[in-house]
Amino acid sequence: MSVKSREIMSIENLNLKFDSTHVLKDVSLSIEKHRVTAIIGPSGSGKSSLLRCLNRMVDLTPTSKTDGAVYFEGGDILSCDCDEVKLRQNIGMVFQKPNPFPRSIYDNVAYGPRLRGVKDRSQLDEIVQRALKGAALWSEVSNRLEDSALELSGGQQQRLCIARSLAVRPQILLMDEPCSALDPAATTRVEDLISQLRNDITVVLVTHNLQQAARASDYTAFLLGGELVEFGETEDIFTNPQDQRTDDYVTGRFG
Amino acid sequence: MNFNSALKWEKMTNGAAVVAFWFVVLTTIGVIAYIFMQGISGISWNFIFEMPVNRGIEGGIWPTIVGTLWLTLGTFAVSVPLGVMSAVYLTEYAEKSFAIRLINLAVVNLAGVPSVVFGLFGLAFFVLFLGFGSSLLSASLTLGIMTLPVVVTATREALVAVPQSYREAAYALGATRSQTIVTHVLPYARPGIVAGTLLGLGRAMGETAPILVTGVAVALPRLPSGFNSRFMALPYHIYIAATQIPGMPKERVWAAALTLLFLVMCLNAAAGLLRERNR
């Protein structure tokens, strides 16, 4: 299998520090195109921090300091000359808690394209419809696009946030525990959606829910205390882990 | 303390709170009702919309109302753009350094500076040094500077209350910092900014000391012709009418006070409505 040819992002010896706290230690990881990569690990293991390095959201924390490289489209996104605004158009992010803007459903999805200068109403209509369909929300909201996004249920809000990211047409979608604030039924819908998404884009999914990682991902990385313990195909990680710590974690002996 | 005395104590503190509450409510209502009853007989179409005659003993108070409204508008024009922009800088752009903490502290303290001190500053700086003279411009600038800390503080509080997750959502969609602020943070914070600003303007509207030395006139039988002209204003007119003009009918003073109270309460009610709608 020619793994290299399908690689869309390569994380090499990534270190992250907040002041003197060493959050990520020499993490190296390869993200495959059109696959779902899950990042698992106990709380505080650096999963979310790792994710936030991949679209430079970590820059919003003034005390952060990164070192190493994350290659995407031939360049190191951690270097200063990378334009993080452009980067975030290519690498979208969905957060732990649904955070729709307090505006209409339509305006939420159209926000990204409008930033980009898309003004034509019919073009926007098309983008909004495509994004909402992509997030499996269209049938539920097509007749009330002008309603406030805050009137949607939690699960719908999260799918709206996914639609909002998709509207920018990212190549990679980073998802930071996207189901942790959702009930089981809504979680199932989002997981189904993640499986569908891989047809068009690449997903990196941080989750503390092991079943979710097992169900929804192709590859799994296990982080512990900021170190990458093991990385491989999801099935191998869960059924035949090479490291004792991985085995302990996936079988529920700790974490 | 046994159960009975605890119960007694509970009843006593409850009772004290209720008494204090009614004291405050009744005083407020009492003041408003008193001004209303004293002043309403003096209110008429002619009183509101006519020029003063014979130093205000006859005629109306129209120039004082117009002057106060212009002054409020001028105060708004000075304090809101400057105040909102500096608050945006302080909360969204500035690094959280010691200097910024010091500036924030200074802004808060500036809100506590007595208004007459602002008046003297306005006299020295705008009227004399910059040569704007005794004018609506000098008075507006002075009141604007006085209102600035209120606007900055209200805006900062409104901006800080915008959840970080909304900023992150915008950044994650590829918005720049200024796009995030303009399309997102400010609209979200707008009701809070407007409500705080209106309260500040309400205070400015009723101020006497800062305008006393920067441009208000005792009596002008005409409307201000521009921002370089002197003007009449309600609070100062009330002071003059109540103390300096022999033979001034009392109900005319109360009627002017009632008019000012009405204008200020309109602003405060607007602020309250916006706050309510924001909820």
Image: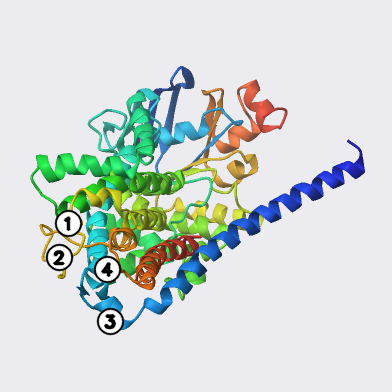
Q: Is residue A87 left or right of residue A24?
A: left
Q: Does mark 2 fall on the same chain as mark 3?
A: yes
Residue at left offset 43%, top offset 58%: A163
Q: Which residue is mark 3?
A: B46
Q: Is residue A83 left or right of residue B195?
A: left
Is there a contact, CB below 8 Å, between mark 4 and mark 1? no
**Which badge, 1 or 2, is on the more N-terminal residue?**
1
Is B32 drawn above or below residue A209 in the view shown?
A: below
Q: Chain of mark 2?
A: B
Distance in Å between CA atoms under marks 4 and 3: 13 Å
Which label lies toward us, 4 or 3? 3
Q: Which residue is mark 4?
A: B65
**Which badge, 4 or 1, is on the more N-terminal residue?**
4
Which label lies toward us, 3 or 2? 3
Is A165 drawn above or below residue A25 in the view shown?
A: below
Distance in Å between CA atoms under marks 3 and 1: 25 Å
Residue farthest toward the front in the current orientation of the protein: B246
Residue at left offset 37%, top offset 71%: B255
Q: Amino acid at mark 2?
A: Pro
